Amino acid sequence: MKKSVSIAFLLLSAILLHGCNKEASTSEVKKVDAETIKTVGEVEVQKMVPPPMVPPPVGNRPAKKIQVMLETVEEVGELANGVQYDFWTFNGTVPGSFIRARVGDEIELTLKNNENSVFPHNIDLHAVNGPGGGAEATFVAPGQSATFTFKALNPGLYVYHCAVAPVGMHIANGMYGLILIEPEGGLPPVDKEFYIMQGDFYTKGKFGEKGFQEFDMDKAIAEHPDYVVFNGNTGSLIGDNELKVNVGETVRLFVGNGGPNLSSSFHVIGEIFDKVYVEGGSVINENVQTTMIPAGGAAIVEFKANVPGDLVLVDHAIFRAFNKGALGKIKVSGEENPAVFKKHK
């Protein structure tokens, strides 16, 4: 397997950053587990679903203990048609599985590093109030696993990612995802929910060059991506993979930006966002055309599908959409609504 950065360098960097405190951190975390889990009654093992799907809404339930299992997997997959890339993933997908909880939940997260991995990995969740967002507690070599528990204190939509050195390389290879902490009482109900995450990829070859493409560290440092895509592939949300809704349905998109470098100008051609949870937080903006999502950030956008047709998802830094792959589609089916939109012959 070809690698752009030596294994020895990665292992040494990781050990220097994490190795000295690993045993102490793990024992401290386990002690906290025993104390905090007592405050939670019911236990739920969260079922992981691949993007663009999400687990069901939390609803109006009391706080509980949530158990989450993630596995880091390194595997060659398709970045574009005929273009292969060595992705580093959580649960085998880019982005990793969507995690869903509510304020007050105790989240017990177990991270396993697949035995076939070459590199160590960990997880930093921006929803965690604690050292490294959990990175120190979850540093795992291939074949190992680690567990820690944290309390969800702040509602919002948060990014998680690998934070083993060199951090940018792990993120650039696809190691990111979203965790939603719903407020007490849950989010208002909608008809459809989908999970979308943008990322920029850096390859030795140019955009569309066929065959296996290695990661290019020089391009990544220069912030010159060859690909900017949704959900890890230029075709992840088009063709047979396009999202489907019906006229009259309300739609909620959980949109993240793994980066590692570029901000996203997220836009849906043919719709206006009725609501945007700005930066994934509690501030709601209304009647928004395009929303900015920084690298390592997120937003929740909502709209109602008023008429049938194709809605096109783009990064409105528009050359990224039409020349680097940041395109998706929502197919809206149903009866025409000439009061809202009418095409004249």
Image: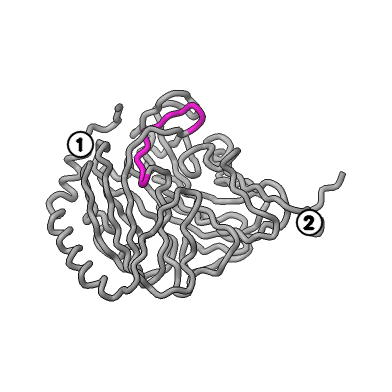
Q: In this view, does 307 lie above or below 116?
A: below
Q: In this view, does 232 lie to the left or right of 251?
A: left
> What residue lies at 50% left-to-right and 49% top-to-bottom?
52
Q: In this view, does 192 lie above or below 82?
A: below
Q: Which quadrant of the figure contains the N terminus?
A: top left
Question: Residue 200's x, y, as percent?
Answer: 44, 41
Main SS of residues in magenta: strand
Q: Which quadrant of the figure contains the C terminus?
A: top right
Describe the element under mark 1 as helix, strand or loop. helix
Q: Residue 186 shows which numbered tag? A: none
Q: Is residue 241 left or right of residue 305?
A: left
Instruction: Inspect the image, locate mark 1, and give the three-letter code of the amino acid beneath it.
Output: Phe
Question: Residue 255's x, y, as percent?
Answer: 50, 54
Q: Which sits in the foreground, 252 or 58?
A: 58
Residue found farthest to the right = 345
Question: Residue 288's x, y, as percent?
Answer: 61, 60
Instruction: Inspect the image, locate mark 2, and give the three-letter code of the amino acid beneath it.
Output: Asn
Q: Residues within 10 Å of mark 2 (few under 14, many from 20)?
A: few
Q: Residue 9 shows which numbered tag? A: 1
* Residue 175 appears in the picture as rendered: no
Q: Which sits in the foreground, 2 or 47?
A: 47
The reply to whether callout 1 and callout 2 are in contact (CB within 8 Å) is no
Of the two numbered discs 1 and 2 on the same chain, state the one appearing first in sequence.
1
